[in-house]
Image (cartoon, rainbow, N blue to C red):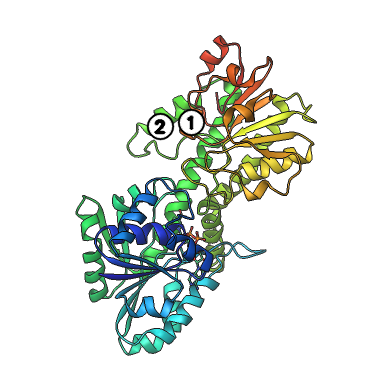
Amino acid sequence: MRICMIGTGYVGLVSGVCFSDLGNSVYCVDKDKDKIDFLNKGKVPIYEPGLDELIKKNFKQKRLFFTTDLKHAVQKSDIIFICVGTPTKKNSDSANLKYVFQVANELKKIIKKYKIIVTKSTVPVTTGDKIEKILIKLKRKKLVDIVSNPEFLREGEAIRDFVYPDRVVIGTNSKKANRILKNLYLPIIKKSSRYLQTSRRGAELIKYASNSFLATKISFINELANLCEKTNVDIKDISNGMGLDQRIGDRFLRAGPAYGGSCFPKDTRALIDTANKYKIDLSIVKSTVKSNNLRKIQLTKKIEKILDKKVKNKKITFLGVTFKPNTDDMREAASIPMIRYLNKKNCEIRYYDPSGEKKEFKPLKNVKYFKNIASACFKTDLIIIHTEWNEFKLLNFKKLVKRNNFIVYDLRNIYSPEKMRELKIKYFAIGR
Ligand SMILES: NC(=O)c1ccc[n+]([C@@H]2O[C@H](COP(=O)([O-])OP(=O)(O)OC[C@H]3O[C@@H](n4cnc5c(N)ncnc54)[C@H](O)[C@@H]3O)[C@@H](O)[C@H]2O)c1
C-alpha cells in the first residue's frame, strides 16, 4: 500500500519506518526542512534503539521517502496518517489542535480522489468530527473517510511495540476504510495481537483513558512508597505482591520519581479539560495530576533532607536525566524541576546521560554535562540515580567517587540496601 505520514516526529517516523519495513511505500512528510534534510542524509533525529538500521534498510530499498512536499506525498498515497504533535496549549490544560487542523485545511486543497485520513495523533474525543467538518465537501463527494487510530507505542521500545502491539484500535463506521486498514495491519495483527474496531469517538477516548489509567497506577504506587518509608516496609514487596494478582498486573507499578514524558502529563491534563467541558468531574485523574506534581517537590525536599539541609555548594551528580531509559526525550522529565530547584539553592550539579547533553540545562549556571559516569561522579557528595539506563545497574561507586562520605540516592531502586550497607555506602532509595 502507499502511505503518507504527516509529521515525522516520534510517532510518524517510527510508524512510517515500520510500515515501510512491512513492504509498503511510505512518504514521511514534515514541515521542518532541517529534519527532512537530516533524514535524507541518512541521519536519525531521535534516539530509538533499532531505528537507524530499519531506516537505512528501507531507504535503500526505495520504500521509504522523506519530503517536505505534502501535495506530492498525498497524491501518491492511499492512506494519510496525521501524526503531528498535540501539546498542551499555553496557559491552559487543553490539547493544542492547531497542527492537526492546519493539516486538515491543507488536505482540503489537495485531495482529488478517495483517500483514508487517519488520525494517529492523540486527540480529544470529537476531534474527528471537527476534521470531518473541515473536509465536509470531500466527505459528501465520498472522497474521504476520517478514521481514528491512536498509537500506543512507548519511546525506547517503539519498534517492538509497533510490530507487536497489545491491540490495534481503529475507530470508524466506514466498512471500506475498516477493510483497507485491517489489510494494512494484517501482518501485525496476525502475530496474535488484537484488532479492535470501535466508533471514531470511542477510539479517541480509549487513548486518553489508557494513558490516564497508567499514570494513575504510577502515582498510586508512588504514594504507597511514602507510607512504606514511614512503616519500614519495602515497596518492592508491595509491587510484587500486588502485581502477581492478574487483575492488577505488575507493569507501571514500580515506585520512583514523578512520571514525565511527552504523553502522560499532557494527556491527563487534556482528559480533565475535555471532561470539564462536558461538566464531568474526573476526580481520580485530577488527583493523579496533583499527586504527580507533588511528587516532584517531595523528592527534591528529600534530597535536601538527605544532605542535612546543607545543600549550598554541594556537588550533586544526576545519573540519567531523561524521563525513561532508551530515549533522548526530555519532555516533562522529572529531572528538570529537580535540577532547576537545586541550582537555585547554589548546588553544583553535574549530570551524565547516555543520550547526551541536554539543551534544557544549557542556560543554567553550575549545571554541567559530563561525557562519562566516572568524571560525573568524581569527588561528588551525592549521586542521584534518576533514570534506569542499563549502564547504571552495576556500578562500583567507591571506585568512581574516589572519596569517603558520599551518598547514593537511588530513585529507581536498582541496588540492594543490604549490600550497600555491607559496603558502608550511605544509601537511600524509594519506599524502603
Ligand atoms: N511520543 C510518543 O511516545 C507518543 C506515543 C503515542 C502517541 N503519541 C502522540 O502522537 C502525536 C505526535 O507525537 P510525537 O511525539 O511524534 O510529536 P513530535 O513533536 O515528536 O513530532 C511532530 C512532528 O510534526 C511536524 N509537523 C507539525 N505540523 C506539521 C505540518 N502541518 N505538516 C507536516 N509536519 C508537521 C513537526 O515538525 C514535528 O516534526 C501526539 O499527538 C502524541 O501525543 C506520541
Q: On the rendered structure, is 205 left or right of 19?
A: right
Circle 2 Cα neighbour tier, 10 Å, few/some/many (<14 / 14–19 / ≥20):
some
Q: Secondary structure at mark 1?
A: helix
Give the foreground label among 2 and 1: 1
Circle 1 Cα neighbour tier, 10 Å, few/some/many (<14 / 14–19 / ≥20):
few
Q: Residue 391 at x, y = what percent?
A: 48, 31
Q: Which mark is residue 242?
A: 2
Q: Is residue 249 above or below residue 48?
A: above
Q: Residue 207 at x, y = what percent?
A: 42, 58
Residue at (65% x, 49% y) in the render? 360
Q: Which mark is residue 426?
A: none
Q: Nearer the viewer, residue 153 or 202?
A: 153
Q: Is residue 281 above or below residue 154?
A: below
Could you tell me how far apart the alpha carbons at marks 2 and 1 are, in whole angstroms? 29 Å
Residue 410 visible in rendering: no
Q: Which residue is mark 1?
A: 391
Image quadrant holding the N terminus, namely bottom left
Type of amino acid at the residue the image marks with label 1: Glu
Residue at (49% x, 47% y) in the render? 215
Q: On the rendered structure, is 288 left or right of 7?
A: right
Q: Nearer the viewer, residue 356 or 430?
A: 356
Q: Secondary structure at mark 2?
A: helix
Choose top left, top right, bottom left or bottom right for residue 93. bottom right
Residue 289 visible in rendering: yes
Q: Residue furthest left?
A: 190
Q: Residue 300 at x, y = what percent?
A: 68, 36
Type of amino acid at the residue the image marks with label 2: Met
Count of all numbered marks drawn on residues in the image: 2
Image quadrant holding the C terminus, namely top right
